[in-house]
Amino acid sequence: MTETASITTEQLRLWDKRHVWHPFTQMQDWERDEQVIIVKGEGSWLIDSEGARYLDGVASMWTNVHGHCRRELNEALKEQVDRLEHSTLLGLASEQSIILAARLAEITPPGLDRFFYSDNGSTAMEVAVKMAYQYQVHAGRPERSRFITFKNAYHGDTLGAVSVGGIDIYHTTFKPLMFETLQAPAPYCYRCELGCNRLTCGMQCLDALEELMTGNAGLVAGLVIEPLVQGAGGMIVQPAGFLKRVRELCDRYDILMIADEVATGFGRTGAMFACDHENVVPDIMALSKGIAAGYLPLAATVTVDKVYSAFLGSYSELKTFFHGHTFTGNPLACAVALKSLQLFEQDNLLAALQPKIAYLKQRLGDFAALPHVGDVRQCGMAAGIELVANRETGESYPWEERIGIKVCLEARKRGVFSRPLGNTIVIFPPLAISTGELDMLLNVLQESILDVTE
Ligand SMILES: *Cc1c(COP(=O)(O)O)cnc(C)c1O
């Protein structure tokens, strides 16, 4: 037994409560409750310090692709660590980051060929925003400094990423520190700000978007969007064709389109990238979460030659992109990411997903019939089940009731780990989940919803 393995669960719980500050967590509640401590992973399962097993229903914060502790990925990591653990991209190139960029260029939408590495989704978006603005400066249009964003959007928690976000409960506190953006209505059909519903939807919200563009003509640097589905906003799925129309509007008003594929990238929607579904090529795309299969922090902001070449010039012109992170292009993360892309091919993962997506769709029909389910939304292997106090009126549960958290605690007793988004229950398992495991996940969530809401 190793030294750390001999530390008791009781001791770990004590130290956790005394020394660890958990993200997005009211620590007063946390300190009072008995916490699960994960020590092992196996496929779609997480195993705690007392040997209990939990199905990982949210792919460890939406990152896991091929399951936990997949042999080939572990070996790729071990092999790399014996060659080189880290070397900087500031002033040096490194093997794995080069191969990964070349490989990613083959699978990202055409023209997106230039990769700027960082280490998480927020930094990938900070890079995107700064890159877009500096591009406008180099193009001789420094007055184009505004960004169009969407209500309910989530792009990360650093200040630039928060500025382009649109979830009030996370963002309001920091308002004095944020820059202003132009916020378009979210394509949230269940609670349409414009009073439409799915039957009457003609994507009228795009008119509001276009008005922002005309009203700020010549002043907008870029538009930031989560393609197909707003994740953290509650798995809010856009009507088919929405993304394509947004691309057309960006073209018409000469605005850079920034696609945040941090959650949707790497197979989640059933295609490699969400943009692929509508043959959209953004000008800048942000990648993270699934990029290294959920193993290590890695991110990339990829752009087209038009943007990249605007930064070229003599040293004294100061067109350099003055941005960078210490662990940029980390070889361990890049080696795992490369192996992950190989596994996509070897396992024929995208094809294997299609029957699972169809099965999920079929089963979600059962959820839609439950008395306290207001809306069910699916985009590939991501789904959200919005619980409501009153199905007829769509009246929400008050957030203080923590209905989503209660359902997830119930699910945990039944061996499933999930984490809600407010009143929306999330289904976001590792892509490699088996149909039997998916079945269990759905059965448990269904029982737990009934238990808590009935
Ligand atoms: C998670 C997420 C981010 C932020 O990523 P972090 O790695 O948590 O900083 C940004 N955009 C989207 C769409 C996300 O889902």
Image (spheres, grey):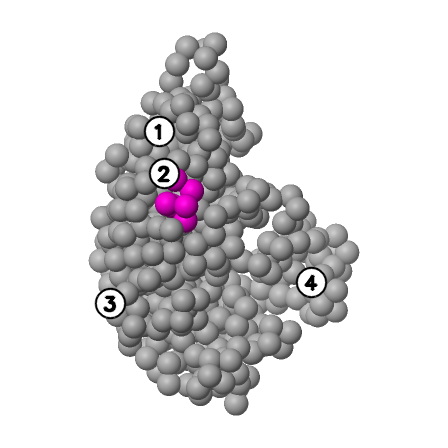
Query: In the visual, does 13 lie left or right of 300?
Result: right
Q: Nearer the viewer, mark 1 or mark 4?
A: 1
Q: Nearer the viewer, mark 4 or mark 2?
A: 2
**Residue behind mark 1:** 307
Residue 213, magenta (yes or no): yes
Instruction: Please give the label number shown on residue 26.
Output: 4
- Which secondary structure, mark 3? helix
Q: Tell me which label, 3 or 2, sits earlier in the chain.
A: 2
The residue closer to the viewer here, 371 or 215, is 215
- Which secondary structure, mark 2? strand
Bin the neighbour count of mark 3 within 10 Å (Cα to Cα): few under 14, some 14-19, many 20 and up.
few
The amino acid pointed to by label 3 is: Pro
- Which secondary structure, mark 1? helix
Q: Nearer the viewer, mark 4 or mark 3?
A: 4
The amino acid pointed to by label 1 is: Val
Q: Kindly report the distance in space between the C-alpha atoms of the residues bearing marks 2 and 1.
A: 9 Å
The amino acid pointed to by label 2 is: Leu
- Examine the image and state in which quarter residue 218 appears: top left
Q: Residue furthest front?
A: 215
**Residue behind mark 2:** 256
Q: Residue furthest bottom?
A: 454
In the displayed structure, 39 sits above or below 444; it is: above
Q: Are marks 2 and 1 in contact (CB under 8 Å)?
A: yes
**Residue behind mark 3:** 355
In the displayed structure, 212 sits above or below 335; it is: below
Q: Tell me which label, 1 or 4, sits earlier in the chain.
A: 4
